[in-house]
Amino acid sequence: MGRTWLAALALLTSGPAMAQAVDSPDVPINPQDNAGLRKVGAEILFWSQAQRDANFPHMEKIFPGHIVKAGGKVHPLPAGKPLAIAEGEIEAFLDTQNVAGLIVLKDGKVVLERYARGYGPEGRWTSFSVAKSFTSTLVGAAIRDGYIKSVQEPVTKYIPELAGSGYDGVTIQQLLTMTSGVKWNEDYTDVKSDVARMFLEPVPAGEDPTVHYMKNLPRETSPGSKWVYKTGETNLIGVLVMRATGKPLATYLSDKVWKPYGMEQDAFWMVDPAGHEVSGCCLSVSLRDYARMAQFVLEGGKGAVPAGWFAESTKTHADIGVPGRGYGYQWWTYPKGRFGAQGIFGQTIRIDPRTRTVIVVSAAAAKATDDAYGIARTAFLDKLFETATTK
């Protein structure tokens, strides 16, 4: 879960159109170096620990992307009363989980903040699939702005090329919850899987690479009846939002969240060969701005999304087959009313509305996914939540 990286890499390195994708002087990509870039992309899951530590905070030096511009006014994160947790426990968590950044907000105040592995408050760290929840937020913004009427509308209204495909009759809500019923294989060990092939096949001139692949997928079950994690569908959500708003996702995120809420630093969003943001992953954000995003969600996103949007999108809409857990509108749900976003190699946002606490972890875990790692991480985060409760 949260394993979207290979698809993003294939997408980012699959053709000469890459030269047109660069939209920022901060992204010095040589358009003639596609072979070298493909090599980097193919090896990312096998980077050494030193390479992960070096590259996760500097993805803009390797891949093309757009800038999510911050404004002039910064949302304050004042210091709060430190959490009553032993420093040794914190250090053990940072060490065993290869954590680069850990921050906890309680009532919007910083009660714990630590950096390691050469990372610091002025840097940015890649999100991997944490970006899915940012993309979902933009759906809410587009509804509030009148670009999209409702999540019950058919996907084909905004992406008419999908008419006659497995996406006929599929709603925006079913895309958000990954319950379209369209058949998909997200097995990264299978070279013939959809996630591996998605952006490697030739795309006719003028066609969007995501739409071109997705429209040829068969239907497996009726819409709304089965949850299957699909990177391709998050990318479709991004296409839908771009079509509806007429804006790049980076621009729209800047307009709706980054500037009005007061993010401190610009963010970086990687793009595909068509010059579109990879909406299922690939944002790079500072630790404190990840925390601000979580706080923005906890506060309800007033002024940016419809009233009740986050209450609806962060509740369980789909059963993922794990007791106590589920899936909302690109948000994971957990016991005790908690919810969050997550990405490979340990990227985490976890939010507890009951205690008004948010936790963000930026990491360079030794493996992309690891059940034991995830269990240990959740146990420590749960302890932080409980400590916040007793403050």
Image (tube, rainbow, N blue to C red):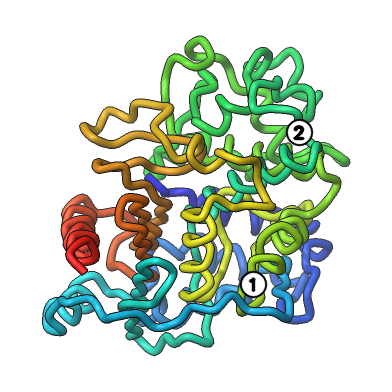
**Where is residue 328 shown, x and y percent of the image?**
45, 35
Say which of 297 and 62 sits in front: 297
Q: Judge depth for marks 1 and 2 and give the one in front.
A: 1
Q: Which mark is residue 148?
A: 2
SS at mark 1 in the image = helix
- Residue ID at (66%, 61%): 257
Q: Which mark is residue 294?
A: none
Q: Callout 2: 10 Å neighbours few (<14), some, many (20+)?
A: many
SS at mark 2 in the image = loop
**Where is residue 329 shown, x and y percent of the image?**
51, 37
In the image, residue 1 above or below residue 30: above
Mark 2 residue type: Ile
Mark 1 residue type: Gly
Mark 1 lies on residue:
262
- Residue ID at (49%, 17%): 224
Would you identify the image quadrant in which residue 272 lies? bottom right
Would you identify the image quadrant in which residue 46 lies? bottom left
For marks 1 and 2, give the CA distance. Answer: 25 Å
**Which numbered disc, 1 or 2, marks the residue that appears first in the sequence?**
2
Q: Is residue 231 visible?
A: yes
